[in-house]
Amino acid sequence: MSAAGATAGLAGFGSAGRGIHAPLLQQAGMTIAAVSTANPKRAEQVRSEVPGAQVVSDLDALLSVEGLDLIVLATPSGVHAVQARQCIAAGIPVVVDKPLATDAMQAFGVVEAARAAGVPLTVFQNRRFDAEHVAARETVRSGQLGEVFRHEFRWERWRPVPKNRWRENASAADGGGILLDLLSHMIDAAVDLFGPIDTVYAETAARTTAAEDDAFLACRHTSGVVSRLGATSVCAAPGPRVRILGRRGAFLLNQFEDDGSDIYPDLADADPAHCGWIYTGAQRTAVSRPAAGQVDFYRQVARALGARDPQAAMPVAPRDAVHTLAVIDAARASAAHAAVQQVSTPAHR
């Protein structure tokens, strides 16, 4: 099978399946042969937007479609672990949208099941492939900032009236809440930049939704860097997205997407070829935008499927997703007890 010849089955055609996964799969040169959805409106959208794709009602039917090289789970977070195990039992490589499960032990069980069955598994940490994140990573690794000691990452929105979706309506146990939604991305980004996290202090609140919609985490990495990660849906004045402080300079990035709500115009990128700034006191230098994007995730998946060792070639190691959930588990305990918590990541013995 050539890298561009992979055939995928897509489970779910909601905001993630339709809005993110389907376009990226197509841009990566994969064929979406079948989509599962029980929603008649979404079934019509599949027929209109993914011509030639077979529409089936559920994951069981999707797994019965012949000739699939890959299953992509773009379904609610609360069912990811169970559905990933179904794909593994069927022997079909699987991409699971983040989070892999609702807690670290569930995620570890999925990873172990995939390892035992020899079925390739990866987790859709698409934000790791954003040009903005790549720019931050390249800046840190270049040494231009000197020794880094603090990483700040904000994901702040103004939604005083929440959207009416499963993400807002489900309990944390069923996959709802901002910790599993946005902090899954933010923790993964922090670990990608600065390595594993040892301890976490967290504050969370549910202001407008069933599970938390406001969270702050202070994470200490094994490397000594402290990441301060804040996500909220109730912020009328969103702060700069990323600020990384080093002994020789700072990296600052105002936004990841242009959503029309930029309240810090002086921090906007100089032009489309730029991606953030390096500050050294009063001096600042624009950072060049890397040639990177979320489609790179699926391009790497396609190459991995044709590799001698598909699991080793996957873009995101499943153990990374287990560690992310271990940090979230520790954050929940920290918020409940108002105390710093040690992160305990399950590991194969």
Image: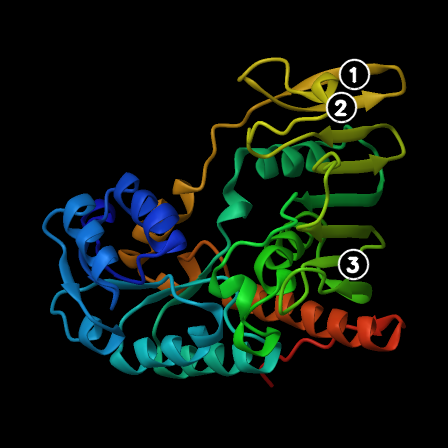
Q: Quadrant of the N terminus?
A: bottom left
Q: Earlier in the sequence, mark 1 or mark 3?
A: 3
Q: Nearer the viewer, mark 3 or mark 2?
A: 3
Query: x, y (%) of residue 60?
Result: 23, 78
Task: Report which residue position mark 1 lands on.
Answer: 284
Whether label 2 touches label 1, CB < 8 Å: yes
Q: Nearer the viewer, residue 181 or 146?
A: 181
Task: Report which residue position mark 3 lands on.
Answer: 217
Q: Secondary structure at mark 3?
A: strand
How far is mark 2 from mark 1, CA to CA?
Answer: 5 Å
Q: Is residue 279 left or right of residue 91?
A: right
Q: Nearer the viewer, mark 1 or mark 3?
A: 3
Q: Which mark is residue 278?
A: 2
How far is mark 1 from mark 3, CA to CA?
Answer: 29 Å
Q: Amino acid at mark 2?
A: Ile
Residue at left offset 66%, top offset 49%: 160
Query: x, y (%) of residue 240?
Result: 73, 34
Q: Amino acid at mark 1?
A: Arg
Whether label 3 touches label 2, CB < 8 Å: no
Q: Amino acid at mark 3?
A: Leu
Q: Earlier in the sequence, mark 2 or mark 1?
A: 2
Query: x, y (%) of residue 74?
Result: 38, 61
